[in-house]
Image (tube, rainbow, N blue to C red):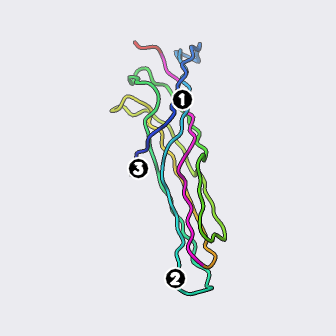
Amino acid sequence: MPTPVAITSEQALEVSVSGPDDISRLYVVTGIATPSLVAAAGDSGMIGVPQAPGRRQGTFEAYVGPTLNGSEFRRAVATASLASLQASGDTSFFEWSVTGVDAHFDDDEERVRLQFDLSVGVGAGTSWSQVLAAGVGVQVLILAASAS
């Protein structure tokens, strides 16, 4: 089940367009999602022994854009990119990635549901280390028809 996240600094732009077909509006929505995904590699208590790497994956979701009804919505596409990252401790490597992104219309909420997947990993040298993904820049493009 995806973890709900807030979108900060959400900005939306509505543009009138002519098609294709009955599409008359394009919404461009941008903002920063605020997930918190941490991976850690801990100290086993054995001095000088490298630690096993830590990895975590998570799926996050947020509702974006204007309220639309099902007859108005036509299509949505989204992008996501890492915006806030941290690493601490004795890291031998660290990694962060956006592994998936999707935007689709939610009939119950009457808004576009943005969903994205993150992966973080860290390898410790000889002591504790961690990595954190705490911000994801998002952009969602929504095509809509005029209300009937």
Q: Residues within 10 Å of mark 1 (few under 14, many from 20)?
A: some
Q: Which mark is residue 61?
A: none
Q: Give yes or no for residue 130 being in the magenta stretch.
A: yes
Q: Which mark is residue 3?
A: 3
* Marks 1 and 3, the one that precedes in the sequence: 3
Which of label 2 and label 3 is nearer to you?
2
Q: Quadrant of residue 30?
A: top right
- Toward the right, the furthest residue is 92
For the record, the magenta segment spans 127-145
Q: Is residue 46 above or below residue 10?
A: below
Q: CA distance from mark 1 to mark 2?
A: 46 Å
Q: Position of residue 78 (x, y in %)?
A: 56, 36
- Toward the left, the furthest residue is 108
Q: Is residue 118 above or below residue 12?
A: below
* Marks 1 and 2, the one that precedes in the sequence: 1
| Amino acid type assigned to the residue bearing label 1 in the image | Val
Count of numbered badges drawn on the protein: 3
Q: Residues within 10 Å of mark 2 (few under 14, many from 20)?
A: few
User: Which residue is disc 1 drawn over?
Assistant: 29
Q: Write the residue at 35% across / 32% down.
A: 109
Magenta: main secondary structure: strand
| Amino acid type assigned to the residue bearing label 2 in the image | Ser
User: Which residue is disc 2 drawn over?
Assistant: 44
Label 2, secondary structure: give it. Answer: loop
